[in-house]
Image (cartoon, rainbow, N blue to C red):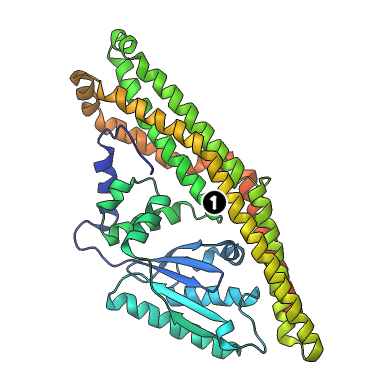
Amino acid sequence: MKKQILALCASAAMLTSVCSFGGCSKAAENTRMTVDINPSVELMVDKDNKVISVTALNDDAAVILQGEASIVGKESDDAVKAIVSLATDTGYIVKGEVSADENTVKISVSGDTKWAKDLAKDAEKKVNQFFKDSGIAGTVEKVDALTSDALKALAEKNSTYTKEEIAEMNDEQVLKVIALGRVETAQLLSNDMREAYFAAKTHEISFAKSDATWKVIQQMNAGYAMLYAGYGAAIQAYGTAIQSLDDMRYSLLVDPESSYQKLLTQMREKKMEIIKKKVEVTISVGDVKVTAEADLSALEKAYDALYTQLENAGKQANDSLTSLISAMTKGQQALQAQYDKLPSDITSALSDKAQELEDDLNKTKDAYFDAFEKAHADDIKAMNDALEQMKKDLIASISAA
């Protein structure tokens, strides 16, 4: 569980920011839509039925969404149609001699209001019309959206809010938190990259709060600085633990040279072979078709084996992080213990400076994405270039079939 210690009144301020984004009373409707073809895509939709963020929920979606910023701003049904069209261009939806259930588009919309239900109906109608106009045999299914608890878990992973803060929010506020996080990380197509970003940002904010407290102590008088030197030492230890954890998480799960990312690349390559072979199956007849179907089955088994390897690599990486997470948690606990011992005149000084501290903290938050992007610019570019090339290759192979 992510903790943010030494709140310095920031919890209330952050919840207020959620309220100001959409209102804490009866708020205007916003919702979350998903389009699952494998690729799986998430759309955050505002009260005017405009898409405000598009997020790849898996690697296949990261491929088809590469370079498609224009989906943002579309009405939700047009955005869903655009995603289905992209999936067709890249071979995830197959034309030719296939049964309709092989081209299934699953749509979910959060909320049980008439507005949400109408969005789902409009999207279904738009996709069915696309299938008809394109001569594609396909089906559209409405599936259940995430539960309230699942939405809160998603918001926790994709924001810097704590579990406790999110627990106090209603569904509308939770959806806004998710939307804000998606907009903030719109340039990060990889889920691993997004999770690494928010974990690192949470740690940075936590450290900034602690460091701000230490600066207030130092400014009071030299005697206090000496008396509470243990607090300063605890901050240094905590900062070291945070840096070690963030560096290790990135190197194991996000770095293009990591075993995890190399396996992901192999999976992409195998998926390309599968898509090309599916097209071959649809246009083949007789013995050629039988051979192509056997080849396709072998490719799918190889893909499943790679997926198992990827899951194992992810588990091993997370296991490797356990000791570092423990060290960071101990650092948090040490800081909290030191904070609890602070006398009333120091806590009073912190209260007096609450607005100043909050302003400084907001500057840290606002500047964080630029710092993260700059630090990992080469890796982000390498990932995006690889996804763009795969998309081009898929489109070329489908066009040539």
Q: Is residue 388 visible?
A: no
Residue lying furthest right: 287
- Classify residue 89 by image quadrant: bottom right
Q: Is residue 236 left or right of residue 354?
A: right
What amino acid is at disc 1? Asp
State the image coordinates of residue 374 (x, y, percent, origin top left): 57, 40
Q: Residues within 10 Å of mark 1 (few under 14, many from 20)?
A: some
Q: Which residue is mark 1?
A: 192
Q: Is residue 384 above or below residue 376?
A: below
Choose between 241 and 363: the one closer to the eye.
Answer: 241
Q: Is residue 8 above or below residue 319?
A: above
Q: Is residue 320 left or right of residue 389?
A: left
Q: Is residue 105 left or right of residue 167?
A: right
State the image coordinates of residue 349 (x, y, percent, origin top left): 22, 22
Instruction: Indicate the quadrant containing the N terminus: top left, top right, bottom left or bottom right.
Output: top left
Q: Secondary structure at mark 1?
A: helix
Instruction: Indicate the quadrant containing the C terminus: top left, top right, bottom left or bottom right.
Output: bottom right
Q: Residue at x 73, y 81 (%)?
A: 293
- Classify residue 226 by image quadrant: top left
Q: Is residue 76 above or below residue 169?
A: below
Q: Residue at x 34, y 56 (%)?
A: 152
State the image coordinates of residue 365 (x, y, percent, origin top left): 40, 40
Q: Residue at x 30, y 35 (%)?
A: 358
